[in-house]
Image (cartoon, rainbow, N blue to C red):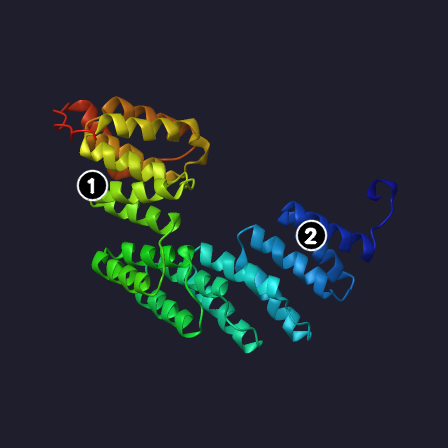
Amino acid sequence: MTDKGLKPDAVVHTILVHLYSKAGNLELAEAAFNNLRSQDFRPSLRLYSSMIMAYVKAGSPKSGEALMKEMEMRDIKPTNEIYMGLLKAFAERGHVDGAQRIFTTMQIAGLHPTLESCTLLVEAYGQAGDVDHARSNFNFMLKAGHKPDDRCVAAMITAYEKKNMLDKALNLLLELEKDGFEPGTATYSVLVDWLGKLQLVDEAEQMLMKINEKGEEAPFEINVSICEMYSRAGVKEKAFEALQRLEAEKERLREDEFERIVEGLLVGGFLSDAKRVHELMQERGFVLSERLRVSLMAAQAIPRQRPRPRPSK
């Protein structure tokens, strides 16, 4: 149209906002939306919703929240989808202030807390390492009559794990189990990761058995925990089994996960494997922390005796 000298009208720009939002192209969606504004076009609920969700998909919930406030000023009531999209986006990033604002706004709007919205708030505080507020919201959920599911309990256990409060985590599980709660793969996976970091290998293996007994597929990330745990313990065979699974899908690994794998291999004395994983990390454009980079250099310069391996079961 522009090549032929035709100026897109409001209808075309509206279609473009919906199209680019669905495709996850924030820059073009924003440009089309701003073009509508320049034409003094009054956005509809559907148009606002598309633009806000474009911000959510792009990981910019603050911009989405600002647009939601604009909606409210124009007496356009946000939908539950908008609220939940923003709440989830804030929660996933551990932005507790934003998550709490959205949660509170939902209540003011007359939307009753659901298991999903309460879980997202617990996850937000857990990601931020604020165990007190995570537990406070967990208790609020219980008082609201919602029975916590496996994902919600895993979020609460994760909050305790960030503060290394294992006794409180285990007490919570005992309390919930008395009320009929049965831990699932999500909860057991968090415990595997935590117990592995503490080098409580036998206990972590018991959690792995629980997952296997359920016949469910364990999350891919659990292989990072397993590899690090067995590497540190010097259990070569099991460490390398997990490492093979990780290398087969190395494109799924985050920078911090690469870091954990390299450090575990170094501590276990598997220097050549640590170097190989570091090279894979560099291929992805990730950079090793200065502390670990120095440790890797030192290990190459000063070979040390590998610790005596723990017997494999």
Mark 1, secondary structure of its residue: helix
The residue drawn where x is 44% and y is 62% is: 119
Quarter assignment of residue 308? top left
Mark 2, secondary structure of its residue: helix
Q: 95 above or below 21?
A: below
Contact between marks 2 and 1 (CB within 8 A): the answer is no
Taking the image as drawn, is residue 288 in sight? no
Which of the labelled discs sits on residue 267, or is there none? none
Q: 71 above or below 4?
A: below
Q: Does residue 109 appear left or right of residue 178 in this picture?
A: right
**Circle 1: residue type:** Asp
- Image spot of residue 220 (x, y percent): 41, 38
Q: Which one is in front, 250 or 34?
A: 250
**Circle 2: residue type:** Ala
- Image spot of residue 306 (x, y percent): 14, 25
Question: Disc 2 designates what residue?
Answer: 31
- Look at the image and tell me in which quarter the C terminus lies: top left
Q: Which one is in front, 291 or 200?
A: 200
Taking the image as drawn, is residue 230 in sight? yes
- Image spot of residue 134 (x, y percent): 36, 65
Counting other residues with Cα less than 10 Å from the Cα at mark 1, is it few (<14), some (14-19), or many (20 or more)?
Answer: few
Counting other residues with Cα less than 10 Å from the Cα at mark 2, is it few (<14), some (14-19), or many (20 or more)?
Answer: some
| Cα–Cα gap, marks 2 and 1 | 56 Å
Question: Disc 1 designates what residue?
Answer: 202
Q: Which one is in front, 89 or 179?
A: 179
Q: Does residue 290 appear left or right of residue 103 in this picture?
A: left
Pick whichever of labels 2 and 1 is earlier in the sequence: 2
Q: Which one is in front, 144 or 84?
A: 144
